Image: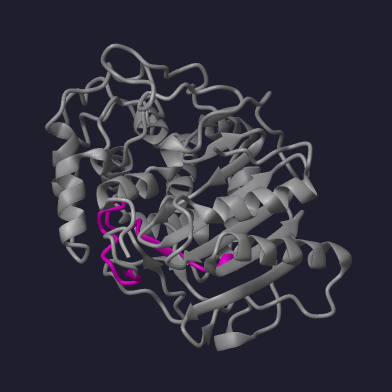
C-alpha cells in the first residue's frame, strides 16, 4: 500500500518539534514548582522498577487509562506507554498494545527519545554558566573556529536556535540520502556540511528558526569547554542526579533490552525501523534511549528547574526568543516561526500555554514529556504506529487528551 511520498512524510516527522510546536498564545513563563524526590517502586519485569500501577486503580488512574485506550483505538496505534505523576507521585503507569506481534508492550521497554536530550544538554550548559565556567553570551570561535560567523554566534544562540543556520533535515539532498540508506552512520561534519552549503537565513541572534545543526555544534563546543564527552557530562550533571538509570546514550543503533520495537511507512512500505541508525538526529554521545518512567522523571525535573537556580530556570524557559521570528523576504514564515509568550522555544525545551515539553518523533518512534508547573503535573507518553496511524506525533495527541481531562484550563495545544 502506498502512502504519502517519503520526503514529505519524513519532513513532517522530523520537524514535529519545530513546525508543529508553535502557534498559540500563553501568558508569563511558569513559576517554580516544588521539588519532590524521584519516584521509585518495587522491582518487576526484567528487574526494573518501571512497572504497571498496582491494581485496583483509583478513579483518576482509571479515567486516564480509559482516555488512553480510546486514543489508541482512535489513532490506530500499535502501542502506547504512559506515566502520569503529580508532584512526583505516581498517578498511573501502564503500557497498551504490542511491541511486536504477540509481544505485549511493557512500561520498562526502551525507545528512542531524540530531542529529549536537548533539554538535558541545555540544563548542563546552564549549570556551567552558574559555575562561571563559561558565559551564555560567549561567542564560539575559540571552540568552533571553522564555523562561519563563529565570532558572532554565541552559546545562547546555539541552544535557542537563533543562529540562522539551515536545518539539514529539510535539505532535499539529505532527505534523499537518509531515505536510501537508513542504516548509514553519520558524522557531525557530514551533517553540518548540509546547512553550510546555504547562506544564513538571517544574522545570528536576530530571528528564530529550528536547526538540528545547532545542537550538533553545541555538543562539540561543550566537549571542548569541559574536556568531557557529552554522554558523560549529561550523566554526571542530569541523568545521574535524577537517578534516570535507564536513560543512556548509544553510539550504535543498538537499544538496551527490553526493546519497544518501532514501525513506519516513511519509505512507502510499512516496515520495522527499530534499528535504523539514529546518528543523524544529533551529535555522538547525545543519541539517547529511555523508558516511560525515566521520561516522566525528565518531564518533571526539567520542567520544574530542579537542577537549576531560579534565574537559570527562567532563562531555560525564555532565553530571549519571545518576540523573535516571523517571515521576511529571506526567511519564510514557515521557517522563521514567530515566537510568542504563548508558544516559544526556550533552551532545549518548548513552552506551550505554561507547559514545558519536548516532543521527539522519527523513524516510527513518537514521544512527549510535558510538565505543567502550576499543577506539578507530569505527562509522559510514547507511541508506535500501525500501517493506518495518521501522520504526525500521535504521542502528542494522547498527551493532549490526558491534559484536557486533568488540566482543562491549561490546554496542551501544540498544533
Note whether residue 108 is visible.
Answer: no
Place of residue 385 in the rendered image (x, y in percent of width and height, measured from the top left): 46, 65
Place of residue 198 in the rendered image (x, y in percent of width and height, measured from the top left): 15, 28
Place of residue 147 in the rendered image (x, y in percent of width and height, measured from the top left): 17, 31
Instruction: Count all numbered tags in the image, as a single digit.
Output: 0
User: Residue 408, located in which quarter of the rendered image?
Assistant: top right
Residue 288: say if magenta: yes
Q: Nearer the viewer, residue 354 or 383?
A: 383
For the N terminus, which image quadrant?
A: bottom left
Q: Main secondary structure of the magenta part?
A: loop
Residue at 51 percent across and 31 percent down: it is: 22
Q: Please say which color scheme the image uses.
A: one colour
User: Residue 295, located in which quarter of the rendered image?
Assistant: bottom right
Asked if residue 370 is positioned above or below residue 285 in the image, the reply reads above
**Drawn side of residue 292 relative to residue 249, left or right:** right
Q: Residue furthest right?
A: 59
**Drawn side of residue 381 relative to residue 407, left or right:** left
Q: Nearer the viewer, residue 369 or 122?
A: 369
Q: What segment is highlighted magenta in the picture?
A: 271-292
Place of residue 171 in the rendered image (x, y in percent of width and height, measured from the top left): 21, 39
Residue at 51 percent across and 76 percent down: it is: 109
Residue at 35 percent across and 60 percent down: it is: 363
Q: Nearer the viewer, residue 345 or 14?
A: 14
Asked if residue 242 is positioned above or below residue 308 in the image, the reply reads below
Amino acid at each position: 500500500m502506498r502512502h504519502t511520498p517519503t520526503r514529505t512524510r519524513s519532513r513532517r516527522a522530523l520537524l514535529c518539534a519545530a513546525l508543529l510546536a508553535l502557534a498559540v498564545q500563553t501568558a508569563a513563563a511558569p513559576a517554580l514548582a516544588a521539588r519532590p524526590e524521584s519516584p521509585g517502586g518495587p522491582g518487576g519485569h526484567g528487574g526494573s522498577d518501571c512497572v504497571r500501577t498496582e491494581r485496583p486503580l483509583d478513579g483518576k488512574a482509571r479515567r486516564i487509562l480509559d482516555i488512553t485506550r480510546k486514543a489508541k483505538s482512535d489513532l490506530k496505534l500499535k502501542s502506547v506507554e504512559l506515566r502520569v505523576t503529580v508532584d512526583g507521585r505516581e498517578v498511573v503507569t501502564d503500557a497498551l498494545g504490542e511491541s511486536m506481534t504477540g509481544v505485549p508492550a511493557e512500561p520498562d521497554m526502551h525507545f528512542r527519545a531524540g530531542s529529549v536530550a536537548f533539554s538535558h544538554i541545555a540544563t548542563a550548559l546552564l549549570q556551567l554558566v552558574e559555575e562561571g565556567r563559561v558565559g551564555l553570551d560567549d561567542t564560539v570561535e575559540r571552540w568552533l573556529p571553522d564555523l562561519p560567523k563563529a565570532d558572532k554566534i554565541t552559546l545562547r544562540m546555539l541552544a535557542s536556535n537563533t543562529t540562522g543556520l539551515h536545518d539539514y533535515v529539510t535539505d532535499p539532498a539529505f532527505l534523499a540520502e537518509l531515505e536510501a540508506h537508513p542504516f548509514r552512520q553519520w558524522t557531525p561534519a557530514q551533517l553540518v556540511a548540509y546547512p553550510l552549503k546555504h547562506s544564513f537565513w538571517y544574522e545570528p541572534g536576530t530571528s528564530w528558526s529550528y536547526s538540528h545543526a545547532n545542537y550538533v555544534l553545541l555538543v562539540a563546543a561543550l566537549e571542548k569547554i569541559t574536556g568531557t564527552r557529552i554522554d558523560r557530562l549529561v550523566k554526571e550533571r542530569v541523568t545521574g542526579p535524577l537517578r534516570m538509570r535507564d536513560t543512556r546514550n548509544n553510539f550504535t543503533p543498538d537499544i538496551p533490552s527490553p526493546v519497544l520495537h518501532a514501525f513506519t511507512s516513511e519509505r512507502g512500505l510499512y516496515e520495522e525501523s527499530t534499528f535504523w541508525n539514529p546518528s543523524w538526529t544529533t551529535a555522538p554521545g547525545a543519541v539517547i534511549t529511555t523508558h516511560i518512567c525515566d521520561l516522566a522523571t525528565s518531564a518533571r525535573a526539567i520542567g520544574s528547574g530542579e537542577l537549576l537556580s531560579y534565574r537559570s530556570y527562567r532563562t531555560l524557559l525564555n532565553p530571549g526568543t519571545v518576540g523573535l521570528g516571523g517571515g521576511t523576504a529571506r526567511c519564510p514564515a514557515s521557517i522563521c516561526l514567530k515566537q510568542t509568550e504563548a508558544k516559544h522555544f526556550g533552551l532545549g525545551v518548548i513552552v506551550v500555554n505554561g507547559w514545558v515539553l519536548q516532543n521527539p518523533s522519527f523513524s516510527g518512534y513518537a514521544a512527549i514529556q510535558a510538565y505543567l508547573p502550576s499543577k506539578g503535573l507530569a505527562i509522559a507518553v510514547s507511541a508506535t504506529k500501525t500501517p493506518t496511524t495518521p501522520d504526525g506525533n500521535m504521542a502528542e495527541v494522547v498527551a493532549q487528551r490526558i491534559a484536557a481531562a486533568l488540566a482543562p484550563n491549561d490546554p496542551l495545544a501544540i498544533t
